[in-house]
Image: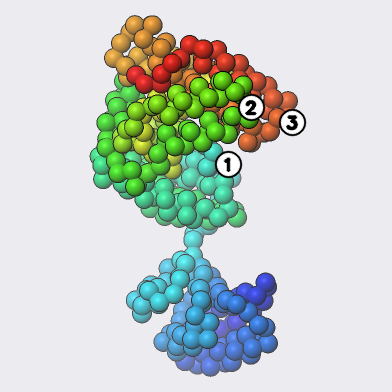
């Protein structure tokens, strides 16, 4: 037995189908839909099939006749069984058809990592779910999946999401990470093996930075950083703002990969293989932009709020600082403190510019925390811009 319910809001006619539609009830369902549509002027039609169990050829012909009058017809929440019928009969090529998403609850799940775009949860021993902050995140999910696919093809070991789910009112990407553990968790459990894990961490970083990419596939981090500098012109003394912009503009062009959020929560070990996750920030450019992000993750954020940084990274702040310095030394291939310090200052310029801009945009300068963080960044930049004359290394 089929049930049809109709809604009309803001010129959109929404039809909800339940049960089964076949030759025995298709004429009655069509009559009800036609009468409702005639009584409610509309610009588009959506058919919600979340509760539809089956549709026969007679029901499909009803949809085609609806589409004849409303060419922009869209089908939503088709179950896997109904979606298979629509795909097999060519409906998915004729009109937009969205498959229904499984529903997940992450209540009580362990948080593995958290970024500006979402939170990563351990759903069960086999599964990790990244829940996006944006309630309409499907375009972001498609982009991250495509970026992960491109990285894997280029030889970067990563986990590609295999499913999309609904989590509350938002969306999540599902990854299979069987008993995988982040480097943060491994270092916390085995602090005596810190050097070993940092070596693996840096080996993967070097592989990422030696991988050539097509500029058409990813974001240019230099362009992004120039936008940060442009935003800060209003908040920095004129000479400092100009120098910051010129330093970034003078960074050599590079078409090599950058992860964009490289820290020990985003590097996992699964069955002895090191994997990179959280690929939505994948981009290209000079390594100084990556090092800036790493500096913030391991040092800068903790300087502003140590408790929050330790909670996020799941490591003591002193350990985070050690990871940063050891990583930088290994990356540069030197133990010379002067050299390490020089490159660190270059990364700090970009890092504090990024953090200052982010703080003003997110917190504003009306809150005490916002003012204090922005002022600390401004003080760091004032000192750094007197010393640093190039971001190249």
Q: Residue at x 51, y 90 (%)?
A: 26
Label 1 vs 2, first from the N-terminus: 1
Instruction: Calculate the distance from the C-alpha at mark 2 to the C-alpha at mark 3.
Output: 14 Å
198 left or right, relative to 184: left
Residue 271 visible in the displayed image:
no
Q: Position of residue 263 (x, y in %)?
A: 43, 28
Q: Residue at x 32, y 16 (%)?
A: 332
332 relative to 365, above or below: above
Q: Is residue 154 above or below residue 88?
A: above
In the rendering, at what x and y percent does residue 56 appear?
A: 43, 85
Q: From mark 3 to mark 1, how far is it between C-alphas?
A: 34 Å
| Residue at image point 51% right, 16% down | 385
Q: Earlier in the sequence, mark 2 or mark 3?
A: 2
Q: Which mark is residue 216?
A: none
Q: Secondary structure at mark 1?
A: loop
Residue under label 3: 366
Which of discs 1 and 2 lies nearer the camera? The answer is: 2
Secondary element type, mark 3: loop
Query: From where the camera sits, is residue 154 visible?
Result: yes
Q: Position of residue 206 (x, y in %)?
A: 29, 27
Earlier in the chain: of badge 3 and badge 1, it is: 1
Mark 2 sits on what residue? 235
Of circles 3 and 1, which is in front?
3
């Amino acid at each position: 037995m089929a049930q049809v319910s109709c809604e009309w809001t803001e010129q959109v006619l929404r039809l909800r189908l339940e049960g089964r539609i076949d030759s025995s009830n298709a004429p009655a369902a069509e009559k009800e839909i036609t009468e409702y549509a005639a009584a409610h002027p509309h610009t588009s039609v959506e058919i919600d099939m979340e509760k539809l169990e089956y549709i026969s050829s007679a029901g499909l012909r009803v949809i085609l006749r609806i589409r004849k009058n409303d060419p922009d017809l869209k089908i939503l929440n088709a179950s896997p069984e109904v979606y298979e019928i629509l795909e097999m009969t060519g409906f998915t090529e004729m009109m937009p058809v969205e498959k229904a998403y499984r529903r997940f609850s992450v209540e009580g799940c362990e948080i593995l990592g958290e970024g500006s775009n979402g939170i990563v949860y351990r759903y069960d021993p086999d599964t990790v779910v990244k829940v996006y902050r944006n309630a309409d995140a499907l375009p972001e999910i498609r982009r991250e999946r495509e970026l992960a696919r491109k990285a894997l093809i280029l030889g970067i070991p990563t986990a590609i999401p295999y499913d999309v789910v609904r989590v509350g009112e938002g969306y999540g990407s599902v990854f299979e990470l069987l008993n995988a553990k982040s480097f943060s968790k491994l270092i916390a459990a085995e602090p005596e093996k810190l050097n070993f894990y940092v070596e693996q961490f840096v080996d993967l970083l070097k592989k990422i930075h030696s991988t050539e990419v097509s500029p058409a596939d990813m974001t240019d981090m230099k362009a992004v950083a120039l936008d940060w500098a442009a935003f800060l012109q209003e908040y920095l003394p004129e000479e400092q703002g100009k120098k910051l912009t010129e330093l970034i503009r003078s960074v050599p062009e590079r078409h090599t990969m950058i992860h964009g959020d490289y820290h020990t929560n985003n590097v996992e070990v699964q069955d002895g293989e090191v994997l990179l996750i959280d690929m939505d920030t994948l981009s290209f450019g000079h390594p100084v932009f990556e090092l800036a992000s790493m500096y913030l993750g391991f040092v800068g954020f903790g300087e502003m709020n140590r408790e929050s940084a330790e909670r996020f990274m799941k490591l003591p702040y002193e350990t985070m600082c050690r990871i940063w310095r050891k990583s930088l030394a290994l990356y540069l291939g030197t133990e010379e403190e002067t050299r390490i310090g020089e490159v660190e200052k270059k990364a700090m310029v970009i890092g504090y510019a990024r953090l200052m801009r982010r703080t003003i945009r997110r917190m504003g300068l009306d809150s005490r925390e916002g003012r204090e963080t922005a002022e600390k960044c401004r003080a760091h930049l004032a000192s750094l811009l007197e010393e640093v004359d190039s971001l190249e290394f």
